[in-house]
Amino acid sequence: MTDEVKKEAGAEIEQGTVGEVKPPKPAGGEASKKEGAPKSAPAPKKEKPDKCEQCGKALSRVKWYYRNGGYYCTKRCWKEFKIKQEGEKKKAEPPAPAQA
């Protein structure tokens, strides 16, 4: 028996509550004592994505190219993606009014 169990048994004998059934204690230690505290799961940490942003090819652990917040399989894919983004940006802008 551990010291904690012995102390609880001694306290029960002194109080006269030997045969009473107690509700089970919640497991979890310190975190379970704070009932008002919300339980927040740690966010999954993902270091790099599985696929190239341009071509969709699987990225190997040995070879991957990181530029401007994106992961690419080669420098060529990064350049193609950059050109594609610039083209989309130009299409999204309204044409400038002609000045005469």
Image (cartoon, rainbow, N blue to C red):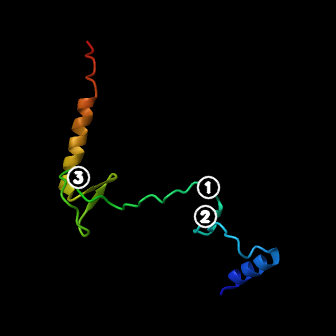
Count residues near mark 2 (Cα–Cα under 10 Å), then give few for <14, some for 14-19, many for 20+: few
Indicate whether 40 appears above or below 97. Answer: below
Mark 3 vs mark 1, foreground winner is 1
Disc 1 + disc 2, Cβ < 8 Å: yes
Count residues near mark 1 (Cα–Cα under 10 Å), then give few for <14, some for 14-19, many for 20+: few
Residue 98: x %, y % from top left: 25, 16
Residue 68: x %, y % from top left: 33, 51
Q: Which one is earlier in the sequence, the residue at label 1 or at label 2?
A: 2
Q: Which one is earlier in the sequence, the residue at label 3 or at label 1?
A: 1
**Residue named by callout 1:** 37
Of all residues shown, which one is farthest toward the front?
19
Identify the element where label 3 is drawn.
Answer: helix
**Residue named by callout 2:** 31
Q: Residue drawn at (70%, 71%), measured in percent from left and top? A: 20
Identify the element where label 1 is drawn.
Answer: loop
Amino acid type shown at disc 1 = Ala
Indicate whether 67 appears above or below 17. Answer: above
Identify the element where label 2 is drawn.
Answer: helix
| Residue 97 or residue 91, whichever sits in front | 91
Amino acid type shown at disc 2 = Ala
Mark 3–mark 1 distance (CA, rounded to whole Å) = 45 Å
Q: Residue drawn at (64%, 54%), measured in percent from left and top? A: 36
